[in-house]
Image: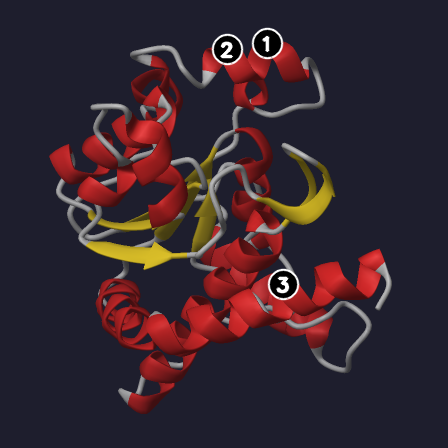
Amino acid sequence: MTAATDYLAKAVLLLQIASRREAATITAAAEAAADAVAKGGLIYIFGTGHSHMMAEEGHFRAGGLACVVPVLATAVMLHEGAMASTQLERLTGLADIVLSRYPIGPADILIVFSTSGVNAAPVEAARFGRARGAKVIAVTSVAYSTAAANGRERLADLGDFVLDTGAPPGDAVAIIRDGVTAGPVSTVLGAALLNALLVEVAIDLERKGHPAPVYLSANMPGAAENNAKLTEIYKARNPHL
């Protein structure tokens, strides 16, 4: 077995474990999200560092839901200064500044991603959502956050629903030498759990008689009309459309 196939095998195993362990939580969280969307609510997604990619993963993509709004702030992304963003996501008060741009309220869902689950920004984002009356779905690694907490509050302590990715402490799974691992798995696991959740939301909406607002690939028949209709519905409430 090569290092590459070993990494992939470990990622697949973690996905299989998560799919079984988190099935009931995904169903419950999706039902809450579908109820919110059916009543006109939105699904906001927040993450910092590499976790911000989960916000983009859910935004304006083929097979995705138009009711998803990414929470995006350059300061906590990586492309304009990775070291600075790492420091900023640990600053108290930053999440409130970022999230205050979005009218999150009791009708909405806020999904917060953080693999380590202990940095100030995602923890405070979850508190922000709860204070606004939104249901909070925390996507994190319980093992990682438990190992890293050192007495600090964890994202896992604040979610109405908690999806455990199962990523190991430190995230990486390929042993390079003693004390050094490579091959992070949190993005693979986080994206899979997010899309599993959103698929369940779409199916739940359809089951209850509410057409799921699903974007089609721009290269598929009928996509232009479908997507134009959806963006017209949501563009006033999604600043990133």
Secondary element type, mark 2: helix
Secondary element type, mark 1: helix
Mark 3 or 2, nearer chain start:
3
Q: Is residue 207 left or right of residue 198?
A: left
Q: Residue at x 59, y 35 (%)?
A: 50
Mark 3 or 1, nearer chain start:
3
State which quadrant residue 132 falls in.
Answer: top left
Say the numbered circle drawn on residue 11.
3
Depth order, front residue of 14/25: 14
CA distance for labels 1 and 2 = 5 Å
Q: Is residue 13 left or right of residue 108?
A: right
Rendering coords of residue 208 (x, y %): 26, 87
Report the mark closest to the observer, 3 or 2. Answer: 3
Amino acid type at mark 2: Gln
Say the numbered circle drawn on residue 84.
1
Q: Residue furthest front?
A: 178
State which quadrant residue 67 falls in.
Answer: bottom left
Crowd class of label 3 (few under 14; some 14 to 19; many from 20; radius 10 Å): many
Crowd class of label 2 (few under 14; some 14 to 19; many from 20; radius 10 Å): few
Q: Quadrant of the C terminus?
A: top right
Q: Residue at x 31, y 70 (%)?
A: 30
Determine whether 68 is above or below 88 in the image: below
Rendering coords of residue 100 (x, y %): 31, 24
Amino acid type at mark 1: Ala
Q: Residue at x 59, y 21 (%)?
A: 74
Q: Are marks 1 and 2 in contact (CB under 8 Å)?
A: yes
Determine whether 91 is above or below 216 in the image: above
Residue 112 makes an appearance in the image: no
Q: Are marks 3 and 1 in contact (CB under 8 Å)?
A: no
Amino acid type at mark 3: Ala
Say the numbered circle drawn on residue 87.
2
Rendering coords of residue 131 (x, y %): 13, 33
